Image (cartoon, rainbow, N blue to C red):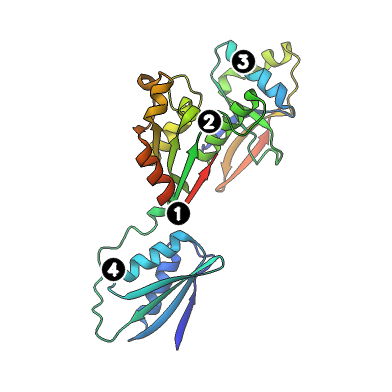
């Protein structure tokens, strides 16, 4: 029989602790751990890996089910206590910003909105892992931009901030970049493609 | 990151918020326009975050220009939750 561990709506590191307890309480067998978010899924998977156990992940609507098999001879050797809750700070999300305005319409309003958007990003956890700026978006990462302070806050917290080099150059502002690094289209493609989630503003 | 304490002026009108930002910035006072914090209002308004020391100065600018605000608030943490206290 497969034992079921319902770890939905549990804050980190609870799902990991519940999984660990369940595994320790049995000699061999199978458990299904149900979690409702990406971070918990990653953490439970990491735990299984560190305990040398076979596991597989499946999706059920909003939830993830991690099936873990504990065999007889499995050598339970735990590695260092993985810094489990760290990923909570970041979501594997890339936000692509292609303009110095948010949405279509009045320019003045659009500029106010993008400023508000970036400020609000600093107030909302988890942070995205990467922000990429291209086309007119690069005007937000250069000298004189009113978003610099907020972008620096995000960068200090560990958010990767990348501006398109071609775009900086085209606008003659390459020497004015004030936050984050310069990148090229290959990296932009990778960031947008490989993140679990990409949001284009 | 999540600021522990700040002062903001909330506006009902986006136009008044934008006008105020321009007028205040033209006097070289350091402020920042932000979306109105949820603790104050759930509507999608704008607020100006400012340094408390500049309060009187900013108030004068707002009065001189006939700009209407919906209040000045102090936002701080209380028992882990953010609360807004209306000052004026």
Instruction: Indicate which disc residue A50 carries.
Output: 4
According to the image, label 3 marks what residue?
Answer: B24
- Identify the mark nearer the N-term, 4 or 2: 4
Mark 3 on the same chain as mark 4: no
Indicate whether A31 appears above or below A79.
Answer: below
Mark 1 residue crowding within 10 angstroms, few (<14) / some (14–19) / many (20+): few
Closest to the observer, A138 or A54 = A138
Outermost bottom residue: A1
Subunit of mark 1?
A
Q: Circle 1 sits in a helix, a strand or a loop, which is it?
A: loop
Mark 3 on the same chain as mark 2: no
Tags 1 and 4 in contact by the CB under 8 Å rule? no
Q: Circle 4 sits in a helix, a strand or a loop, which is it?
A: helix
Subunit of mark 4?
A
Q: Residue at x 36, y 41 (%)?
A: A187
Closest to the observer, B61 or A43 = A43
- Identify the mark nearer the N-term, 1 or 2: 2
Q: What is the C-alpha distance between the residues marked 3 and 2?
A: 26 Å
Q: What is the C-alpha distance between the residues marked 3 and 4?
A: 57 Å
The quarter holding residue A27 reads: bottom left
According to the image, label 2 marks what residue?
Answer: A99
Q: Position of residue A90 (x, y in %)?
A: 43, 49
- Quadrant in which the N terminus of chain A is drawn: bottom left
Q: What is the C-alpha distance between the residues marked 4 and 2?
A: 43 Å
Tell me if I can see residue B57 in this picture: no
- Horizontal side of A87 relative to A72 (left or right) equals right
The quarter holding residue A9 reads: bottom right
Mark 3 residue crowding within 10 angstroms, few (<14) / some (14–19) / many (20+): many
According to the image, label 1 marks what residue?
Answer: A196
Mark 2 residue crowding within 10 angstroms, few (<14) / some (14–19) / many (20+): some
Tell me if I can see residue B5 in this picture: yes
Q: Nearer the viewer, mark 3 or mark 4?
A: 4
């Amino acid at each position: 029989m497969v034992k079921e561990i319902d770890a939905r709506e549990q804050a980190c590191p609870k799902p990991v602790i519940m999984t660990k307890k369940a595994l320790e309480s049995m000699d061999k067998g199978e458990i299904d751990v149900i979690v409702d978010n990406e971070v918990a899924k990653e953490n439970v998977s990491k735990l299984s890996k560190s305990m040398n156990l076979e596991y597989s992940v499946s999706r059920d609507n909003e939830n993830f089910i991690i099936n873990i098999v504990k065999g007889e001879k499995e050598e339970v050797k735990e590695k260092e206590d993985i810094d489990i809750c760290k990923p909570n700070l970041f979501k594997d999300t890339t936000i692509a910003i292609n303009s110095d305005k948010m949405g279509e319409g009045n320019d003045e309003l659009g500029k106010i909105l993008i400023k508000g958007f970036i400020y609000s990003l600093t107030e909302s956890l988890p942070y995205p892992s990467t922000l990429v700026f291209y086309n007119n978006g690069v005007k937000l990462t250069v000298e004189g931009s009113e978003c610099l302070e907020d972008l620096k806050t995000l960068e200090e917290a560990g958010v990767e901030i990348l501006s398109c080099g071609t775009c900086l150059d085209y606008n003659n502002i390459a020497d004015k970049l004030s936050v984050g690094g310069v990148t090229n289209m290959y990296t932009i493609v990778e960031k947008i493609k490989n993140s679990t989630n990409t949001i284009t503003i | 990151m999540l600021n522990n304490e700040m002062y903001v002026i909330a506006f009902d009108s986006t136009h008044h918020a934008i006008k105020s930002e321009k007028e205040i910035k033209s006097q070289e006072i350091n402020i920042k326009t932000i979306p109105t914090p949820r603790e104050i209002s759930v509507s999608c308004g704008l607020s100006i975050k400012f340094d408390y020391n500049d309060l009187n100065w900013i108030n004068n600018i707002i009065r001189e220009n006939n700009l209407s605000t919906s209040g000045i608030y102090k936002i701080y943490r209380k028992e882990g939750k953010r609360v807004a206290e209306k000052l004026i």
